[in-house]
Every structure is written in structure tokens, then in C-alpha cells.
Amino acid sequence: MSSSPDPIQEWHRQAQAELLAGRLRKAHQLCLSILQAQPNHPDALFICGVIAASNGRLAKAADIIERAVALAPSRADYLAELGKVLAQLRKPGAA
């Protein structure tokens, strides 16, 4: 008897692949599905923040990525992306 795959893990894997392929809308939809089931999923939040930044919504991106950083403060990639977004917002002290 094999266990069925965890849908959240599968959505996450797919969201990462869609993000890498530049299919931001699909990646965003998958992340929203994850966040509906697990509102504090740090990587789904992070991906949403990256998508917001790539769409020019820098303030929203900073807010979302800050949430991801609060949930996973040791993730260097989250911190680097947050610094990048804050620098684009002309907040070098915060960056």
C-alpha cells in the first residue's frame, strides 16, 4: 500500500518549475493553493513576493518577502531577495 503524494509538496514543486520557466501566473496560482491550505508556508510566500517584484509591485513584494523571512529567518535567498527589493525601493538602511 503506497501513500498518496502530499498535494502541497506537489504544488510547491510545480510552482518552483513554473517560476523558473517564467510562467508567473501559473506559479502564483499554485502558491495561492498552497497558502489556502497552509497560510504560513514560507516558500509559497517567497515565490509570491518574487512574482510581485517582477511585476513591479515592490512595496507588496517587500511585505510578502518580510513575512517569509519572519517564518524562515535563516534562508539566505529570502534575505538576499528582500535586500534587493528594499534597495529598489530606495531603502538602503533597511536593505
Image (cartoon, rainbow, N blue to C red):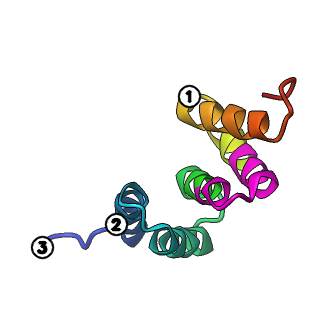
Residue 89 position in % (x across, y down): 82, 41
x 78%, y 28%: residue: 95
Badge 3 or badge 2: first in the primary sequence: 3
Q: Is residue 52 magenta?
A: yes
Secondary structure of the residue carrying numbered label 1: helix
- Total residue callouts: 3
Mark 2 neighbour class, 10 Å CA radius: few under 14, some 14 to 19, many 20 or more: few
Tag 3 near tag 2, CB within 8 Å: no
- Name the amino acid, label 1: Ala
SS assignment for the magenta stretch, majority: helix
Q: Which is more toward the observer, 3 or 10?
A: 10
Badge 3 or badge 1: first in the primary sequence: 3
Secondary structure of the residue carrying numbered label 2: helix
Q: Which is more toward the observer, 5 or 74?
A: 74
Judging by the rendered image, the residue that carries numbered circle 3 is 1
Residue 59 position in % (x across, y down): 81, 52
Q: CA distance from mark 3 to mark 1?
A: 39 Å
| Residue farthest to the top, as pictured | 93
Corner quadrant of residue 70: top right
x 69%, y 47%: residue: 65
- Name the amino acid, label 3: Met
- Name the amino acid, label 2: Glu
Residue 57 position in % (x across, y down): 74, 59
| Residue farthest to the left, as pictured | 1
Say which quadrant the N terminus sits in: bottom left
Q: Which mark is residue 10?
A: 2
Judging by the rendered image, the residue that carries numbered circle 1 is 76
Which residue range is magenta in the image? Answer: 51-66
Locate residue 68 relative to residue 44 in the image: left or right. Answer: right
